[in-house]
Image (tube, rainbow, N blue to C red):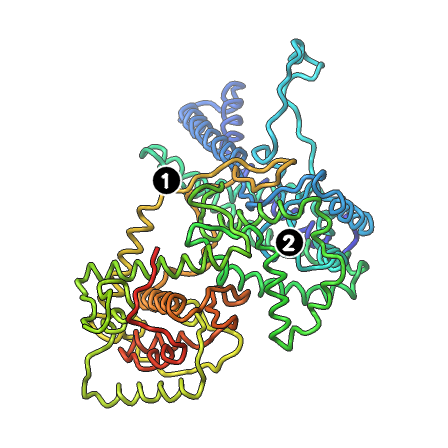
């Protein structure tokens, strides 16, 4: 370990953690030591008479129980499997240039190189200790007849201490250039130096074992005896974990400070520029997941090139946002994904892992969980999503007994029409002056803002590009949700929520699958439980108002496609988009909200008339 101040502070904190471990061992051995003294004193005649014989046997029994409990706790801590981040392992054969870059960086920093490299679908990078026996490959099978003989390779094999695994965020490889990636990884790789110190490594193993033991004791047990035993083990491990928590946190801060100090000599100026790209990549990745990937996941499709989509999303952001100007000019340099032999297969594995983590999708592709390319996204995801939601909306209307509009001049009145939805959501006329004034104010605001559609303004957020945003004060109920236009609207929203819940309950359960190999990279599913999926849900469940607004928006888009020649499209920053004459339209969201919350259809009808949409015409549903 180097002479950095942070490294010395980390070692002192590591020794403090090890002292807590030694004190716990001493407390466990203290009754045994007292029992030994009493038994030896009685056998040699130094402690005789009175109650000493009875006391010695009582202390011996207590010491045996304490030793048994301590052995059980130690066994649980030693055998508990520490948590491991779900990653896509990258073999050296599939990325020799990337391994070479990391090893050269470790040589420049004078630290041990990481033992392996893995990718994670997140905008972060770190070192992860995977030296626990449960995290390594199974021992090789000895086929020699004398393999079990002493001195000929038999017996239990000892695992050589391995350096931590370098985990890299997959969006970094596609958005960053090679020099920027090296600058960003420099302080991370520098952390292998303090990690190799025996005291710090032992302290980390002890803390990780306690944390894993707490997780084991928190799992539901089968019987009352097991629950009682695990409760006692959990109390002791939590006590030890609380005792060393402060020292462990300060130890990690010292390690980080030492790594940052050591990495200052490597690409320091470029690292300042690269940190700007880290923030930009995080913003683009979050936007891509919530606006683009999530609608596809809900339809049973998973985009197979999410990391490549980050480049497209950030390029679009640099085109729209003046603050991001100049970032797209970097695309002429060599991207870091060129360090991979097969970037397409790695991107596909990372995309599947992202769907697994953020949505809880199946571990392997199948008929109901198929990959989708970006060229097929508008037809396979956007069009299907709108028509599926429109079909669900009309099923709920049928269940509520809503009749179709009666117009003798229009044929096919029994089909699924937008007019049926508009008539049902239109609130009956009331003499309320405040509501009328609010509707008039909204119509005036829409008249000033122009005509268009921004599909994400209904439930998942607001758009970021062209179009004037209309801000209108909304009336909210006791639960914090905006008040819907009428009782019929509230009943329709509740029906949609119930219908969607039934569909999700009827969906088949997901199951884990095998991990990847050196030939075909893939996520490693063996270190975590399927019951925790999704680990990082992107959004909370949609409320009834959001569901209704999304379904009405889908119905409007279906009518626009079937009667006005509009087409589904993909916006890299806002997700599904409606294209009219090849141009994305904006500002549909506020008009739909006016219909849902106020029961006023006039702003939406004006929008439909402007585009030539015929609400009375039936639409094609899934």
Left or right: 270, with 394 as reference point? right
Q: Where is residue 415, by image quadrant?
A: bottom left
Q: Where is residue 609, by image quadrant?
A: bottom left
Give the residue at the far top of this rendering. Answer: 145
Q: Position of residue 517 (x, y in %)?
A: 61, 35
Q: Is residue 258 visible?
A: no
Q: Earlier in the sequence, mark 2 or mark 1?
A: 2
Q: Which mark is residue 413?
A: none
Residue drawn at x 78%, y 63% is 268
Marks counted in the figure total: 2
564 or 15: nearer the viewer: 564
Q: Position of residue 208 (x, y in %)?
A: 56, 43
Q: Residues within 10 Å of mark 2 (few under 14, many from 20)?
A: some
Q: Position of residue 68 (x, y in %)?
A: 46, 29
Q: Is residue 489 visible?
A: yes
561 or 594: nearer the viewer: 561
The residue that disc 2 covers is 125
In this view, 166 is above or below 571: above
Q: Where is residue 407, by image quadrant?
A: bottom left
Give the SS element for disc 1: loop
Q: Position of residue 443 (x, y in %)?
A: 35, 86
Q: CA distance from mark 2 to mark 1?
A: 33 Å
The residue that disc 1 covers is 220
In this view, 262 is above or below 56: below
Residue drawn at x 35%, y 81% is 606
Residue drawn at x 59%, y 40% is 22
């Amino acid at each position: 370990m180097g002479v950095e101040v942070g490294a010395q502070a980390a070692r002192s904190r590591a020794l403090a953690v090890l002292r807590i471990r030694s004190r716990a061992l001493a407390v466990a051995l203290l009754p045994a030591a007292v029992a030994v003294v009493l038994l030896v004193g009685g056998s040699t005649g130094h402690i005789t008479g009175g109650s000493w014989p009875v006391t010695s046997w009582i202390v011996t029994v207590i010491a045996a129980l304490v030793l048994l409990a301590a052995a059980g706790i130690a066994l649980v801590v030693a055998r508990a499997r520490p948590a491991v981040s779900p990653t896509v392992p990258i073999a050296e054969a599939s990325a020799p240039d990337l391994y070479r870059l990391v090893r050269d960086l470790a040589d420049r920093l004078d630290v041990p190189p990481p033992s392996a490299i893995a990718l994670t679908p997140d905008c972060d990078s770190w070192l992860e200790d995977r030296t626990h026996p449960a995290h390594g490959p199974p021992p090789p099978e000895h086929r020699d007849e004398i393999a079990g003989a002493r001195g000929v390779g038999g017996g239990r094999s000892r695992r050589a201490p391995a350096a931590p695994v370098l985990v890299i965020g997959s969006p970094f490889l596609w958005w960053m250039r090679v020099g920027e990636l090296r600058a960003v990884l420099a302080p991370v790789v520098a952390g292998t130096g303090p990690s190799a110190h025996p005291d710090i490594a032992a302290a980390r193993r002890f803390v990780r074992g306690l944390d894993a033991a707490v997780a084991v004791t928190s799992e539901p047990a089968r019987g009352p005896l097991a629950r009682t035993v695990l409760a006692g083990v959990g109390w002791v491990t939590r006590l030890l974990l609380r005792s060393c928590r402060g020292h462990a946190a300060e130890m990690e801060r010292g390690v980080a400070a030492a790594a940052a100090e050591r990495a200052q000599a490597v690409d320091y100026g470029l690292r300042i520029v690269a940190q700007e790209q880290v923030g930009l990549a995080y913003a683009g990745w979050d936007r891509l997941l919530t606006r683009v990937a999530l609608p596809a996941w809900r339809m049973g499709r998973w985009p197979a090139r999410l990391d490549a989509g980050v480049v497209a999303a950030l390029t679009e952001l640099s085109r729209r946002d003046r603050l991001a100007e100049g970032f797209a000019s970097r695309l002429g340099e060599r991207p870091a994904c060129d360090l991979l032999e097969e970037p397409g297969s790695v991107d596909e594995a990372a995309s599947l892992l992202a769907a697994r983590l953020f949505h809880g999708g199946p571990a392997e592709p199948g008929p109901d969980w198929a990959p989708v390319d970006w060229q097929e996204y508008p037809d396979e995801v956007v069009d299907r999503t709108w028509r599926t939601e429109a079909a669900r909306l009309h099923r709920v209307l049928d269940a509520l007994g809503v009749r179709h509009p009666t117009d003798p001049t229009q044929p096919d009145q029994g089909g699924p029409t937008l007019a049926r939805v508009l008539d049902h959501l239109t609130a009956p006329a009331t003499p309320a002056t405040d509501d009328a004034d609010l509707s008039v104010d909204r119509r005036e605001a829409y008249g000033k803002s122009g005509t268009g559609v921004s599909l994400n303004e209904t439930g998942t957020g607001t758009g970021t590009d062209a179009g004037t945003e209309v801000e209108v004060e909304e009336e909210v109920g006791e639960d914090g949700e905006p008040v819907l236009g009428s009782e019929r609207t509230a009943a329709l929203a509740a029906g949609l929520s119930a219908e969607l819940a039934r569909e999700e309950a009827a969906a088949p359960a997901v199951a884990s699958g095998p991990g990847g190999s050196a030939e075909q990279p893939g996520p490693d599913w063996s270190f975590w439980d399927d019951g925790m999926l999704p680990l990082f849900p992107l959004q909370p469940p949609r409320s009834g108002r959001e569901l209704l607004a999304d379904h009405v928006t889908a119905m409007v888009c279906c009518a626009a496609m079937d009667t006005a020649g509009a087409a589904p499209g993909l916006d890299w920053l806002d997700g599904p988009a409606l294209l009219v004459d090849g141009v994305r339209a904006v500002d549909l969201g506020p008009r739909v909200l006016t219909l849902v919350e106020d029961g006023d259809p006039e702003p939406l009808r004006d929008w439909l008339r402007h585009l030539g949409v015929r609400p009375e015409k039936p639409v094609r549903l899934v």
